[in-house]
Amino acid sequence: MVNFQKGNGFLLFLFFIFFTSTQAQSSEAISGKVLSEGQEPLEAVAVVLLSVKDSTYVDYTITDVNGEFKISEAQKGDYILNISSLGYISLYKNITYTGEALTFGNLTLVEDTYELEGVTLTAVVPVQIKQDTIAFNTNSFKVDADDNLEELLNKIELGD
């Protein structure tokens, strides 16, 4: 039970609770939610605040499991908000932060798709067996320039 006769401590306690709850409610920040084109939240997306003047790093965070981010330590000023993740096209937004809460809502990242050039695979078969004949491709065996036929046959026999 609270002792009201020592009211100064109790009033100070009430003031502290009121002050901290109003501070928590008025926390100014830059926030938003990052989604894929399929409207799925993207986790672990890098959200970087850069200076407009020289693109230097100002603040950084990553999205949570719900795709949400919050940068709360920014000073007032003009910035570039860079949102990027591997496999997606980076998103850049020029913003002016006035110290008031700045909420972007849903930001969609587009998948970065690209086509690779075709690849041709060629195989060299070192040994071919045709009915009663075994044919060796001599280019498949490592030989020195001064090796003779006997040394090549020894390498084939040993499987070098």
Image (cartoon, rainbow, N blue to C red):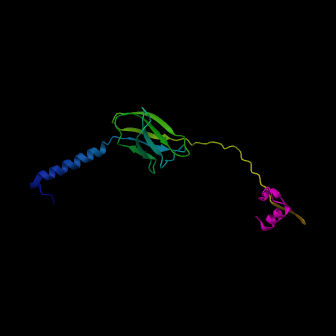
The residue furthest front is 146
The residue furthest left is 5
The magenta stretch is 135-160
Using residue 72 as the reference point, say whether residue 121 is left or right of it.
right
Considering depth in this image, is 151 or 1 the residue closer to the camera?
A: 151
The residue furthest bottom is 158
The verdict on residue 146 being magenta is: yes
Considering depth in this image, is 148 or 14 the residue closer to the camera?
A: 148
Considering depth in this image, is 157 or 12 the residue closer to the camera?
A: 157
Q: Quadrant of residue 74?
A: top left
Q: Residue at x 44, y 38 (%)?
A: 81
In which quadrant will I find the C terminus? bottom right
Using residue 42 as the reference point, say whether residue 139 is left or right of it.
right
- The x and y percentages for residue 155 are 79, 64
The verdict on residue 153 being magenta is: yes
Q: Residue at x 81, y 67 (%)?
A: 157
Considering depth in this image, is 146 or 36 the residue closer to the camera?
A: 146
Looking at the picture, does residue 110 appear above or below residue 7? above
Q: Quadrant of residue 27?
A: top left
Using residue 38 as the reference point, say whether residue 53 is left or right of it.
left
- The x and y percentages for residue 153 are 83, 64
- The x and y percentages for residue 57 are 42, 40
- The x and y percentages for residue 73 are 35, 42
Q: Residue at x 34, y 33 (%)?
A: 98
